[in-house]
Image (cartoon, grey):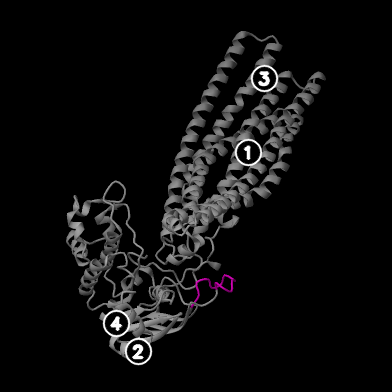
Amino acid sequence: MTATATRPGRSGDALPGGAALPVADPATTRRAALRLVRRDGRAVTLMLALNALAAGAGLAGPWLLGRIVDTVRSGGGVHTVDRLALVILACGLAQLLLARYARYVGHRFGERTVARVREQYVDRALALPAAVVERAGTGDLTARGTSDVTSVARALRDAVPEVCVAAAQALFLLGAVVVLDPLLGLCGLGVFSGVFAVRWYLRRAHGAYLAEGAATSALAELLAATAAGARTVEALGLQERRTAASEQAVEHCRRTRTRTLFLRSVLLPAVDVAYVVPVVGVLLVGGALHGHGGISLGVVITAALYLRQLSDPLATILFWAEQLQSSGAAFARVEGLGQAPRTRTAPEALLPHPSAEPSPALPADDRIEVTAVHYAYGAGSGSPAADRDVLHGVDLTVRPGERLAVVGPSGAGKSTLGRLLAGIDAPRHGSVTVGGVPVAALDPAALRRQVVLVTQEHHVFLGTLRDNLQIAAPDAGDATLRAALAAVGADWAAELPAGLDTELGAGGHRPDGSQSQQLALARVVLADPHTVILDEATALLDPRTARHTERALAAVLTGRTVIAIAHRLHTAHDADRVAVMEEGRLTELGTHDDLVAANGAYAALWSSWHS
């Protein structure tokens, strides 16, 4: 992490081409759904049993109504009709209570399962290596964690109980018609004429809904980036370009949604016709049989009522089948996060990572070795421009306890080198090791004890000042937290109304840029690593505060390895050695005095900055 501690992934974890996060295939999605069901198997079994009982109770009404018709035609008394009517009422009440309790059990199952999905998603998102998140973009991650998880939640909470009730009712109703009269049962099978429309729909729906989800993610990413960089967009006069890009993304999103709407507009009318076919067939065939004395009028009425009732559960199943295509695509995107590269401390109990590897050996010492390193940000994407190296054969040794300054013009590769040293990225060729172990292969907990990267980016999380500091040291007491703040010159913290219990963010104290960066530096002090990489870590502070903070940090970091990437060359002046980067190459390495005397690139930088 940039402002607190680094959480890198293993070498080779970057997504192919640096594109979007993975999407789970149908088989993986089905297995994940079955795992969720098995985790709450008792509730599912109870729900199915209650639905079956409710469906059985619902069969009594039409059958007893047919008995009433036959009783009246045969001259039966009023008492018989009243008795049958009371039984119909009792069965209807029983069906209502059973169905209500079944839905109650189903909704509780849904809420528990949704909670598991959300918790699993958060665990997986937090376990993603920083490089993966950067390449995929936060828009995709945000869309999966909001709209996609909401769609899955709606399906689990509502679809499971509704579909179970409807499926039980449909099976019992069809079975009842067959029991009444096999020939009428054959007429009832006419309801399956809608299967052709459903198959046509299902072959196209999954891909269409995946495309809709991807378009939504792309739109979210574009809008988030535009909003975050609104001032830059305005300053550079890019409003029209960003507006055009946004309109294009909105239009693409509209087309994908129109496609799914078209599929529904074909499916629903075709299935509505299928509902009418069996009822018409039963009335025609049943009427003919009754005319020839083959069956009673009550049987015909009962069968017609059963098939008429069949339309409601089938409509429910159809509605949720359509919704489940959207939710299934959303679940595939949510579950796809489990296939993304992740750190070794990710919760493995929920979904074992197929490429899990044994933990590497611990570093023998704190010595950092960079050997013949080449790196390209888009390696493997297939684009010649993206595959172009930004680092070329860099060799560097950082001794334990050394203060090394990395300087050079913008775009020279300083920050890229810092990311490799911190284990966020792995080199395409060559190696970056600490104590003989590849940095990018270290377990995050072990890495945090070795290397911490602090950049210009800073993060203030919702919660108290204490909460924000204890991210780096959960067991730290108040005295330790105050000492860390004092170490980085955060005098403002002592003036907060509630001290360490002051809420930060909306509704509380809003730290400005310099206070947020001091908060990030205080986390570094609490993390207590042996190597600290400062990538313009004091850039947002005014020169006086920055100098004060750097001096305070220098006192705190005595005895530790410090790698400072900076444009303010007084940092280089105070360092033990200076490394000069130019066009992705390490061109000079030595003390400040030696490099100035050499009259090379560093001497020119120093002269320009000092004057």
Q: Nearer the viewer, mark 4 or mark 1?
A: 4
Left/right placement of residue 526 relative to residue 339 reads left
Q: Which label sits on residue 318?
A: 1
Where the N terminus falls, by quadrant?
A: bottom left
Quadrant assignment, res 178: top right
Q: CA distance from mark 3 to mark 1?
A: 29 Å
Where the C terminus falls, by quadrant?
A: bottom left
Quadrant assignment, res 193: top right
* 59 w.r.t. 565: above or below: above
Mark 4 surroundings within 10 Å by alpha-carbon count, few (fewer than 14), some (14 through 19), many (20 or more) = some
Residue 379 on the magenta segment: yes
**Where residue 531 appears, x then y in whole percent?**
31, 75
Q: Which residue is mark 4?
A: 400
Q: CA distance from mark 1 to mark 2?
A: 79 Å
Q: Which residue is mark 2?
A: 599
Say whether disc 3 or disc 4 marks the residue closer to the N-terminus.
3
Query: What amino acid is labelled 1 in the image?
Result: Leu
Say whether disc 3 or disc 1 marks the residue closer to the N-terminus.
3
Assign the magenta stretch its main secondary structure.
Answer: loop
| Residue drawn at (61%, 12%) of the image | 80
Mark 3 surroundings within 10 Å by alpha-carbon count, few (fewer than 14), some (14 through 19), many (20 or more) = many
Q: Which residue is mark 3?
A: 66
Q: CA distance from mark 4 to mark 1?
A: 67 Å
**Where residue 458 appears, x then y in whole percent?**
34, 61
Name the element at disc 2: loop
Say whether disc 4 or disc 1 marks the residue closer to the N-terminus.
1
Q: CA distance from mark 3 to mark 2?
A: 107 Å
Residue 564 on the magenta segment: no
| Residue drawn at (46%, 38%) of the image | 105
